[in-house]
DNA sequence: CTGTTAGCGCTTTCAA
DNA sequence: TTGAAAGCGCTAACAG
């Protein structure tokens, strides 16, 4: 059972390969109804599938878009991917996917790999949007997601980090929490973290950085212990109403874990809220108030802007597109 | 800034394309150190990347594997994907990915799409492993994941569903729960669900099907209400110690949501455990006992068995490979 | 309406 | 140690 080629079909149909090619590409105007029908049947009978490799080579174009994600296990990421895939298949694009696993060097490798696959465009959820590699990749064929570079070179799709947090934390303040803390992985010059922190400072009016509690990133037991200790100090020292805002779902998880070992309960001992919404937040007891971001929509928007750019020729200066968030207020503060 | 081809490099180096090709493919034995060095420098200088499309066509082989997942938003799936990607890139394979979004017809389309991309092999997390499409795809180039067909045609990687549940539920029984319920989406002849149910029956000794509580799948508000009502009846009617085992994380979520609206608390009013482990289960109050499955390992195993098959020529009869699970006992029963 | 033919960028004999 | 040249399966003028 050999693999069929366009030649085989042409022979069977007694036409030239050009005609078959036209059929494949939907140029039916260029053939009689008879041959059209003949080819149609033959293709079904033989279960012939044109080689997309050959097509790509001949057309010198590739209807696939490459995506590099920073961490596929991040639940945010899989929803984004879902949106990307959805939008791509609607536009007839295939997606090939790579995972940097939070490693900046691997991200570079992945991008290079993707480039030699000759993808039409790139969507990147960057580990490090400030990596020098983005100096050499073209804004015409790529868009970034989530994290944005300090010096914007590539169109990026992000959420309204600062504003969303500012409004949310303001609500916490209005609920009487007058001693608020921002729980986050080390800021590390990462836009999502620092932009959310700016929102936090806006809302609280804190000038110094005494109200940020850093969660160790991929810490050892020891680091987590220190984190817990810091929390303990905060809880013991203060008389005022204490509230925590977690910078994302994972930071929130860590916070809760430590609070649990310290035997503190929300909303009695403290109030809490977080960026990101996940299913499980509503079965917590009591359920968690949070900021919902439209991850699926981010994926879709990324694809749309990318394909849009691919179509035009003109180059625009890069800008960031904001996908709005939504407050979900429940009973955690 | 035109795209460089092998010809350009050949010209610049004053050698033939064949030599450059040999260089690219690591056949250094076939050239002098001088030319080797010359080519090396040129490639770096010019940032030349060979076209993998052209290579694939010329070699008539494609170092990419295609994967079709049933639902990318399922957290189980993203961890599997992570394993697949990891193993693939170690073996030098690219992965192109499709999402069926729980739609059997889309799964078929995806597989056909993947085939005409001429992927070397297929990994499928099937919506419906009994779909007729699997009669025509070759076991030599594909492996399945998670759900298995009634009549096995394709090698599949699964967990020890029956056994794991049987042992876990036995433990619940030993803890004094003498009135146990299996909480699941409709069995619908889906292996993961029915195999787990078999384990449940084994452990409990129930002969009839009175102890299964069906969670509506993508239900409307109404259906969820009925589900909640059913739970209420169970809770009110019985004097014995009631325990629930959820067939997966999402069913568990649903169960908890309803229990919450009914104002019942575990482990006081009922005991509970679930298949699948997620991060958030340990910050529940109290934390949840569950069965941990090695999703990453499933992905890796899938890739390994696939690549293994790709290498040999002989065809074996399909079998199912089991990736073991692990009990995580906490305080939910 | 249909066929001829020269590529697309690379690999791979085979000969030099 | 190197090169010439014939493909890989398809597309796209161009000619008829």
Image (tube, coloured by chain):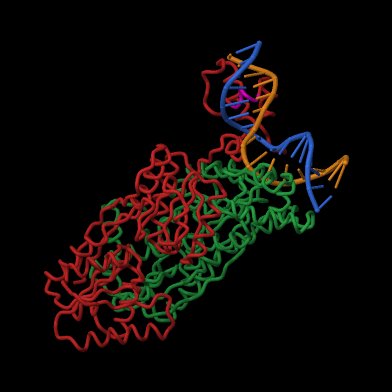
Chain colours: A red, B green, C orange, D blue
Vertical side of A129 occupied by B165: above or below: below
Vertical side of A242 occupied by A87: above or below: above
Q: In this view, does B208 lie to the left or right of B87?
A: left
Asked if one can make out residue B28 in the rendered structure from this viewpoint, the answer is yes
Observer-nearest of A327 and A145: A145
Asked if one can make out residue A282 in the rendered structure from this viewpoint, the answer is no
Observer-nearest of D16 and B216: D16
Which of the 4 image quadrants contains residue A210? Answer: bottom left
Magenta part mainly helix, strand or loop? helix
Picture coordinates of residue B27 (x, y %)?
Answer: 75, 55
Asked whether residue B119 is drawn in magenta, I would say no
Which of the 4 image quadrants contains residue C9? Answer: top right
Picture coordinates of residue A250 (x, y %)?
Answer: 35, 70
Q: In which quarter of the image is the C terminus of chain B?
A: bottom left
Asked whether residue A20 is drawn in magenta, I would say yes
Picture coordinates of residue B129 (x, y %)?
Answer: 54, 51
Residue pictured at 56% horizontal, 15% vertical:
A32
Q: Is residue B23 left or right of residue B233?
A: right
Picture coordinates of residue A223 (x, y %)?
Answer: 39, 83
Q: Give the range drawn in magenta.
A: A17-21
- Badge count: 0
Residue pictured at 40% horizontal, 37% vertical:
A312
């Amino acid at each position: 059972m050999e693999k069929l080629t366009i030649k085989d079909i042409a022979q069977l149909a007694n036409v030239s390969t050009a005609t078959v090619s036209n059929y494949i590409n939907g140029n039916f105007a260029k053939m009689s109804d008879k041959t059209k029908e003949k080819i149609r049947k033959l293709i079904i009978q033989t279960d012939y599938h044109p080689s997309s490799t050959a097509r790509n080579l001949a057309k010198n174009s590739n209807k696939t878009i490459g995506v590099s994600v920073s961490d596929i296990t991040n639940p945010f990421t899989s929803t984004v991917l879902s949106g990307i895939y959805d939008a791509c298949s609607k536009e007839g694009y295939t997606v090939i996917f790579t995972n940097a696993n939070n490693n900046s060097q691997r991200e570079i490798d992945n991008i290079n790999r993707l480039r030699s696959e000759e993808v039409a465009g790139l969507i990147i959820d960057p580990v490090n949007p400030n990596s020098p590699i983005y100096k050499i990749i073209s804004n015409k064929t790529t868009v970034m997601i989530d994290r944005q570079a300090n010096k914007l070179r590539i169109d990026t799709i992000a959420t309204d980090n600062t504003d969303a947090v500012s409004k949310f934390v303001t609500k916490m303040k209005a609920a009487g929490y007058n001693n608020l803390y921002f729980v986050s992985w080390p800021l590390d010059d990462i836009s999502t973290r620092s932009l959310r922190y700016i929102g936090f400072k806006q809302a609280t009016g804190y000038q110094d950085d005494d109200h940020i509690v850093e969660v160790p990133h991929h810490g050892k037991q020891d680091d987590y212990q220190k984190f817990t200790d810091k929390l303990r100090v905060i809880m013991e020292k203060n008389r005022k109403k204490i509230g925590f805002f977690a910078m994302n779902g994972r930071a929130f998880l860590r916070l809760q874990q430590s609070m649990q070992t310290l035997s503190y309960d929300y909303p009695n001992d403290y109030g809490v809220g977080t960026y990101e919404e996940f299913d499980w937040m509503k079965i917590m007891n009591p359920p968690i108030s949070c900021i919902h971001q439209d991850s699926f929509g981010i994926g879709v928007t990324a694809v749309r802007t990318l394909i849009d750019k691919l179509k035009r020729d003109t180059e625009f200066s890069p800008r960031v597109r904001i996908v709005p968030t939504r407050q979900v207020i429940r009973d955690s503060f």
